[in-house]
Amino acid sequence: MGKKRSEPIDALTKIVTERQPITLRGVRQYAACYVGMKGWTREEMYEFIRDNFNVDGENKVTLRDITKAQLTSDYSNITDNSAQLQSISMTGDAVLKVGAETISYLVTNLSQSGAKPVLLSNASNYYTLGDYADGKVNAELVRIVEVQSD
């Protein structure tokens, strides 16, 4: 049986989340594998890299943290203390069971032009929200920091 289609990006995510050193070239190679599977253009691949990774002066990739200032400037925020974590992976990808109010907020936000990504707080963690189906939301666990790391 062949490799799962998500293995290249899963490997890249693991490298980044475990803060193992990887060069920008390495990111491009992994992303290129992923792009081939998704049928993305080269521009979409570079947009994916820019949106998901920071590259330092030595071409090492690091995780992008969300600063406290970005909480309000770059994200639309909602608190749902009843949100229940259903599953989480080593990479921070999660599935949350959320209330009807959160789903309504997410749908309303997505229907607005210029909408910001939704950041959910459940009193203990922050998650960026993604796709919704059957009362559950795909999400990503994020880390809030005082200032951007160098």
Image (cartoon, rainbow, N blue to C red):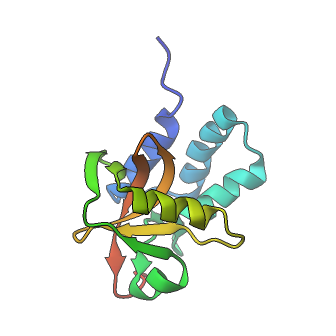
Name above or below for residue 67 compared with residue 18.
Answer: below
Name above or below for residue 118 compared with residue 6.
Answer: below
Q: Is residue 16 visible?
A: no
Residue at 56%, 43% in the rendered image:
30
**Residue 109 lies in quadrant:** bottom right
**Residue 143 lies in quadrant:** bottom left
Residue 74 position in % (x across, y down):
54, 79
Task: Using residue 44 as the reference point, say whether residue 22 is left or right of it.
Answer: left
Viewer-closest of 59 and 93 = 93
Task: Using residue 74 as the reference point, say whether residue 87 is left or right of it.
Answer: left
Residue at 58%, 64% in the rendered image:
108
Residue at 42%, 49% in the rendered image:
137
Q: Outermost residue toward the left?
A: 124
Residue at 54%, 50% in the rendered image:
26
Viewer-closest of 130 and 102 = 102
Residue 86 position in % (x across, y down):
27, 45
Task: Using residue 96 as the reference point, say whether residue 109 is left or right of it.
Answer: right
Task: Using residue 150 as the reference point, say whether residue 50 is left or right of it.
Answer: right
Q: Quadrant of the C terminus?
A: bottom left
Viewer-closest of 84 and 30 = 84
Q: Is residue 85 visible?
A: yes
Residue 28 position in % (x across, y down):
61, 50
Residue 79 position in % (x across, y down):
34, 72
The tally of labels here is 0
